[in-house]
Amino acid sequence: MLLNKLVQSGVAFVAVGTTAALVHLLAFGFLKVHLLPELANLLAFVLAFGVSFAGHRWLSFQDAQTSLMQSLKRFALTSVAGFASNQLLFVILFRGFGLSDWLALGLALGLAAVQTFVLSRWWAFKV
């Protein structure tokens, strides 16, 4: 039963995360034409945050044992930690190793997704 809930939560997490990542990528694609890629990444993250929180609260972790405000505060910290990892890896890959901005962002988003799932599942939405 616990494994089934974990799988169900994981599937919902991937669906919500994919949607939020698409919002992030679309916003990044638009913004990078006008701003430095690092700033475009930050603003795209901010736009995707709302999609991510709402989806995870009501779909991925619907059995959350935390209040809405407690989840929001914890998820904000979780997301900021995920973004810090994302931005650090993005800058290292893009500026340090010369990867394309799209490849660097894709790899950075992948790392942040794993980190965010672990922190969300067992802390932000504590189920």
Image (cartoon, rainbow, N blue to C red):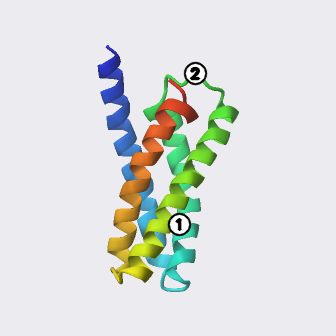
Q: Residue at x 32, y 36 (%)?
A: 11
| Left-right relation of 14 to 43 | left
Label annotation for residue 65: 2
Q: Nearer the viewer, mark 1 or mark 2?
A: 2
Quarter of the image where one finds residue 13: top left
Amino acid type assigned to the residue bearing label 1 in the image: Ala
Q: In this view, does 85 lie above or below 43?
A: above
Helix, strand or loop at label 2? It is loop
SS for tag 1?
A: helix
- Say which residue appears at 48% left-offset and 69% top-offset: 27
Q: Name the residue under label 1.
A: 44
Q: Find residue 1 and report its horizontal and vertical position in percent.
A: 31, 13
- Tell me where residue 17 appears, x and y as whole percent: 41, 48
Horizontal and vertical percent position of residue 71: 62, 35
Up-down relation of residue 63 to residue 45 (above or below): above
Tell me: residue 77, above or below residue 45: above
Residue drawn at the location 54% of the way across and 86% of the way down: 34
For the point 35% across and 74% down, the residue is 102
Residue 126, how many percent across, how many down? Answer: 54, 27
In the picture, measured across the screen, residue 4 lies left or right of residue 66, that is left
User: Residue 54: which disc?
Assistant: none
Q: How far apart are marks 1 and 2 (CA)?
A: 29 Å
Judge left or right: residue 13 versus residue 127: left
N-terminal label among 1 and 2: 1
The three-letter amino acid code for the residue at tag 2 is Gln
